[in-house]
């Protein structure tokens, strides 16, 4: 039985127990969330090295790091380096988005080495193999696509992005909408090309029950992808995006009825003032399903700094109720990320997630900041480093310009906290 089916029968699985211990909540809280569909635990039965992770309502906001090769660069060694950096930096999940090299071997190596949930987008490999086999993505057969999905699932991936909501109706909305950036989802673009060429409905939508059967067998979580996500602020929250979201709401209900866990992917590029509306729309339309967003990026002009752009949007989204942030790296829009880009992307998203968790009242979030403040008051530099999101960087920066005294080199002998502590101490003595 899947985690969802167990939870509905009142059974607390070992995976639910593990998540409860990590989150410092009661196991029954996790069971109830899984049963309702507001919490998912991606845990393919074939992923033997997995430490289960919970994503959803009432839990710490989780971070995903995208790695993977391109047709231009990358191999197993490069991706293992990225995986190590992602894990060392604190990523809660990793997606392998490889489109170059020996894709199957890369995926299997990552799964075997990873204790965190692994996600993939099976249509990437199915489309690439269709080019090799039939000379074009649009000549991919329905069986080609589903065989690709099955291979990924049998290999042990814990969640898969499937763009089931890219329907003919959504394409018609897109045509009438008139976007600045059209479609920026690679999986969505593969499907749109296939649907228009073959004059058929999206096979992931038409044969959704077939997809559910495969997912249920291995307890794989469906990450219902947003092929119509806006890739430009000008396209945010438009009719094509909302058309797809409405379909994903219906598919979420069908997944739950089939005993399959599901979460929803979201934008993308959004102005700051549209983030709250997007989160609330998803939670309402998709019956509280966990929300997984890319960023969102709040400006289009920060090339090279999009990890910051994404963190700004991610903090707001997390505070409103988003459950899962897909990191954005400095390389976004420019190149394939290297290990240092991965590190910076994970750290930026962790900062955003933690800022949101403070607002959401997640257990231990505000206490972490209080402990840091106490350490700063004491000028305890090692404790400050230990409590930092990036301890290594904290130690490095503090040592860069060493102060002669206990304070840092910013203020030296004129440290505000030391002076005020002295003044207050004298006043207290006089009283």
Image (cartoon, rainbow, N blue to C red):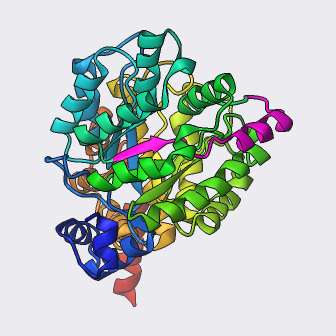
Examine the image and state in which quarter residue 196 appears. top right
Q: Estimate the x, y position of residue 76 in percent, counting from the top left.
A: 23, 20
The quarter in which the C terminus is drawn is bottom left
Q: From what the image shows, is residue 249 above or below residue 186?
A: below
- Left or right of 365: which side holds 293? right
Q: From what the image shows, is residue 29 above or below residue 384?
A: below
Front residue of 234/250: it is 250
Residue at image location 66% in from the left, 48% down from the top: 244
Examine the image and state in which quarter residue 301 appears. top right
Q: Is residue 374 visible?
A: no
Q: Is residue 384 magenta?
A: no
- Left or right of 28: which side holds 280? right
Q: Estimate the x, y position of residue 25 in percent, counting from the top left.
A: 29, 77
Q: Estimate the x, y position of residue 81 in percent, counting from the top left.
A: 24, 26
Q: Is residue 171 magenta?
A: yes
Q: Estimate the x, y position of residue 128 in percent, counting from the top left.
A: 44, 18
The quarter in which the N terminus is drawn is bottom left
- Left or right of 291: which side holds 151? left
Front residue of 59/348: it is 59
Front residue of 417/119: it is 119
Examine the image and state in which quarter residue 24 appears. bottom left
Q: From what the image shows, is residue 49 above or below residue 424?
A: above
Residue at image location 19% in from the left, 54% down from the top: 51
- Left or right of 24: which side holds 135? right
Magenta segment, which residues? 159-181
Residue at the extreme bottom of the image, as rendered? 431
Q: Is residue 82 visible?
A: yes
Residue at image location 23% in from the left, 37% down from the top: 155
């Amino acid at each position: 039985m899947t985690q969802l089916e167990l939870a509905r029968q009142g059974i607390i699985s070992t995976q639910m127990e593990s998540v409860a211990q990590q989150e410092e909540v009661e196991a029954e809280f996790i069971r109830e969330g899984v049963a309702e569909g507001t919490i998912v635990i991606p845990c393919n039965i074939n992923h033997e090295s997995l430490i289960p992770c919970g994503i959803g309502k009432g839990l710490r906001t989780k971070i995903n790091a995208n790695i993977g090769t391109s047709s231009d660069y990358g191999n197993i060694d490069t991706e293992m380096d990225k995986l190590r950096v992602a894990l060392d930096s604190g990523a809660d999940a990793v997606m392998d988005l490889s489109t170059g090299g020996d894709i199957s071997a890369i995926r299997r190596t990552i799964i075997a080495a990873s204790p965190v949930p692994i996600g993939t987008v099976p249509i990437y490999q199915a489309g690439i193999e269709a080019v090799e086999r039939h000379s074009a993505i649009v000549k991919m057969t329905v069986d080609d696509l589903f065989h690709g999905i099955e291979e990924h699932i049998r290999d042990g991936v814990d969640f898969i992005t499937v763009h089931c909501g890219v329907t003919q109706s959504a394409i018609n909305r897109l045509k009438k909408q008139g976007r600045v950036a059209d479609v920026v989802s690679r999986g969505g673009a593969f499907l749109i090309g296939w649907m228009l060429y073959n004059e058929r409905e999206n096979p992931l939508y038409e044969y959704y029950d077939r997809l559910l059967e495969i997912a249920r067998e291995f307890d794989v979580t469906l990450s219902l992808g947003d092929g119509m996500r806006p890739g430009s602020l000008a396209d945010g929250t438009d009719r094509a995006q909302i058309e797809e979201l409405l379909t994903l709401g219906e598919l979420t209900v069908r997944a739950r009825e089939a005993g399959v866990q599901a979460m929803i992917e979201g934008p993308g590029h959004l102005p700051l003032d549209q983030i709250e509306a997007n989160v609330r729309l998803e939670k309402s339309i998709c019956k509280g399903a966990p929300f997984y967003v890319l960023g969102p990026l709040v400006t289009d002009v920060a090339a090279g700094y999009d990890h910051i752009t994404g963190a700004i949007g991610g903090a707001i989204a997390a505070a409103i109720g988003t459950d899962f942030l897909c990191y954005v790296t400095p390389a976004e829009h420019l190149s394939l990320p290297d290990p240092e880009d991965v590190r910076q992307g994970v750290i930026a998203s962790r900062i955003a997630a933690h800022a949101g968790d403070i607002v959401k009242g997640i257990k231990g979030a505000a206490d972490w900041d209080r402990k840091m403040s106490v350490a700063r008051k004491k000028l305890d530099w090692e404790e400050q480093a230990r409590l930092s999101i990036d301890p290594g960087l904290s130690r490095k920066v503090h040592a860069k310009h060493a102060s002669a005294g206990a304070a840092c080199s910013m203020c030296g002998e004129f440290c505000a906290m030391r002076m005020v502590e002295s003044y207050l101490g004298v006043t207290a003595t006089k009283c």
